[in-house]
Amino acid sequence: MLTRGTVVIDVEACKGCDLCIDACPPRVLVMTTDEHNTRGYRYPELLPGCTGCRACAQICPDFCFQVYKYDTPIEVA
Amino acid sequence: MTKSRPDGLTIIPTDQPPTCASRLVDDFTPDLIDVGEHHLCPGCGEPIAIRSMVEAVSELELVQLTIAVFGIGCYTAFSNNLDVEVLQALHGRAPSLATGVKRAKPNTIVFTVQGDGDMVNEGLQEVIHAAARGENITCFMVNNGVFGETGGHMTATTVIGQRTKNTLDGRDAEQHGHPIRLANLLAEVDGAAYVARGAVNNAGNVARTKRMILDAFETQRAGRGFSFVEILTMCPTGWFIETQEAPAYLADNLGAVHQVGVLKS
Amino acid sequence: MSTTTAPPARLLEGSEAIAEAMIAAGCRFFAGYPMTPFTEVLEAMAAKLPDVGGVCMNAESELEAVGMAWGAAATGTLAATGSTGQGLSLMQESLAEITLARLPLVVLNMARAQGDYFQATRGGGHGDYRHVVLAPIDVPEAVHLVQLAFHLTWRWRNPVLVFGDYYLAHTTQSVAVDAVDFGERVPADWTLDGSTGGSGRARLISPLGDAKRADRVGYNLAEHYRTCAAHTDEMVAGIEPMAEVRDTDDADVVVIAFGTPARYVRAAVKQLRADGAKVGYVRPITLFPFPTDAVARATANARRVAVYENNQGQMVDDVRLAVLGRAPVQFIGGLSLDSAGFGIAPDLDVAVLRARIEEVLGA
C-alpha cells in the first residue's frame, strides 16, 4: 500500500470520540477494540495508506495527532 | 515496521516520529494553546474552533497585537489557557468589553469568543449594536444550539425538533418559539462588513471555516468595520447522541437551519 | 497634596465641573447612557474628551456603558462611567465582577435623592466586594473628590464611586478646576495591549482570577476570592476615612448628614450655635470606608445624635454602629421629593431643618 505520510498519536490525550475515524479520507484510522488508555478510552490506530493530509489533526478536539508527510511515498506491506 | 491486531488488521506503530525522510505538517497542540488537555466532552467541536482562531492569529502574525475577549460557556475553559492576552467578560457582555478595548487601543486586534447562549440569549443587543456601530472588532460565535455548560437547555438558536433538556419532545414553534439565525440577522445590519457561517464537523468544513476566520481578521486589520463568524460545533452531550453521530447530526439539523456560507463580504 | 496649576475660578454647572475634574485627573475614556440627572455629565464628556485625545461613547444601554468602560480600563486607560440610581442598578453584576477582576474604574451616581446609600455602600451586586464611596457636598468639593477617586481607584485597583445628586449636577458655582497632584501613579504590570502574546506568559484579566487548579486547567475560584478579600482588607486599612466635624466637643446634640442636604443641615447648625444652642455637626465624606471612629469620637459626650438624610433611613444604620448605644440615635430625615421623584424641597430649607433639630434639643 503506497503510503505518503504517518502520524504520531498521543494515546493518553485521546477521549475516544471517534471523529478522526470518519474524518480520514483514505480511511486508515481504526479504533482499538479491547485496548484503552489509562483514562479508559479506546484510541485510534493507523493502517497503511496515510496521505499526510492532516484531516485527523484538524478534526481532533484533543490535539492528539502529530502528522508527518514523507519526502517520498513508501510501500508498506 | 507493521504489527498485526487480534482482528487481523495490519497497523503501523504511532508512538514515535518516522525515521525516513519526512517533514512535520501538524504538531499536536497549537503553540498558542498552553495546555492541550481540557475537560470538555469527547467529541466537542469547540476546541476545534478555538484551534482555528489561534492558528489564524499566528499565521497573520498578530499574536503581539491581539486581545481575546471571552464570554461564558464551556469554551471559557480556554480563557486561562491561551498564550494570547485575554480579557474575561460576563455572559453576553463580550462585545461591549471588546469595544472598550478597541476604542482605547485602536492598534490592537480584538476578537470575542462567545457561545450561542451567551451571544444570542444573554447578549443579543450587544452584538447587534456593535455591528451597527461598524465596530472594528471580530466576534466569533461557537453555536451548538444548546447551553452546554449548564447542562443542555434550549437557546435562541436551538432548531425546531431539536431535543434539549427543556424541549425533550423536540423544540416546538408554538410552545417554544423559533430559532434566531444570527449570522443572517447581522448580515442585514449596515456596519457589518464581513459575516460568515462555518462549521467544524468535517475536515473540509474546518478548512473552509479557517478561511472565514482569516478573512474576518483581515477585515478588522483593514478597518472595514464589524466582522463576524458563526461556527457550528458538535455537542454530542447536549444533543443526547453518540460522538460519532454528531457530525451528521450537525449537518442534518443545525446546518439545515443555520446554513454555512459567506453571507456578506 | 499640592496644586500644580492655578486656573481662574469660573461659573460652572456641577456636571461640567465634574467632567473637567475627570479630565484633569487623567480620565481618557468615558461611556454613558442618558438618564436624568446624569445626562449633562455625559454631554460634557462627549464635548471635552475628544479634545484631549480621549474617547467618549454614547452607549446603547447602561450595561453596554459599563462594559465599554471595563474594556478600556483593562488596557490601563483611566476610565469612568455613571448614571443615576436606576442605571447603576442595571450595572451591578458588571460592577461586582469588575471589582473581582481588580480593575480601576470611577463610577458616578448622580442620584435623585439619597435612597441609593445602601446601593453605593453595600454594593447592589453579588458576592463580597466593597467600593470606596465619596460624597461631595458642593461643586468645589466634587472637583477635588472626583480627582481623588481616580487616584484611589488606580492605587487600589478597585472601583470608586462618587455619590452626587441632582443639585450637584445642576447647581452653578464659582469653581477653579485645579488639577490636584497625588504624586506618581503606581506603575501597572497588569494592563492589556496585546504585547505579552506569544511570550509564554500572556496576560489575563478575569473576574475568575488567574489561579489554576492543581490539574493545570480550570480556574481556582476559592483561591482567587481569598486573594480579593485580602486586597479589600488592605485597601480598607490603607484609606483614611474622611469627615467634616464641627463644634462637637461640647455638643448636646450632634447632627449627621451627607451630600447636598448637609449644606442645609450645616447652615441650620450654625444658626442654632449662633443662638446659643450646643449643637455639633458631622458630615461623612467617605461613605465607605465610613468614618466610624470620627463619628464615635464626635458623639462621645453627646446626649443625643440626630441623623438627617433624604431617604427612609440608610446611613442612620452606619451611625448607630459607630455610636454603639452610647446615646440614642434619632432619625430626623425622610423622603423629601418632588412629584418626579427627585430629592429637592421641601426639606432642603434651613428653617425646616432647624425646627427638626430644635425638637431633638428639646427632647
Image: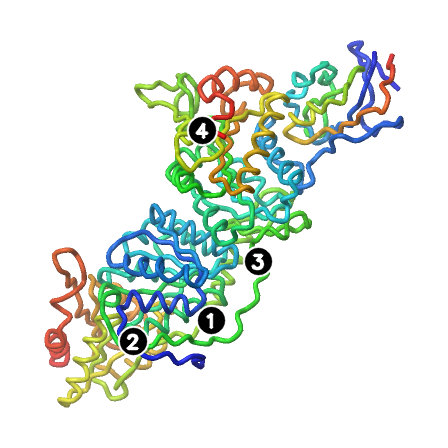
Q: Which residue is mark 1?
A: C237
Q: Chain of mark 1?
A: C
Q: Which residue is mark 2?
A: C10
Q: Chain of mark 3?
A: C
Q: Which residue is mark 3?
A: C190
Amino acid type, residue under disc 1 in the picture: Ala
What SS does tag 1 mark? helix
What is the x, y in percent for residue C31?
A: 38, 54
Q: Residues within 10 Å of mark 2 (few under 14, many from 20)?
A: few
What is the x, y in percent for residue C189?
A: 59, 61
Does B54 appear above or below C4? above
Does A30 appear above or below C211? above
What SS does tag 2 mark? strand
Q: Residues within 10 Å of mark 3 (few under 14, many from 20)?
A: some
Q: Which residue is mark 4?
A: B183
Residue farthest top in this picture: B8
Q: Is residue B149 visible?
A: no
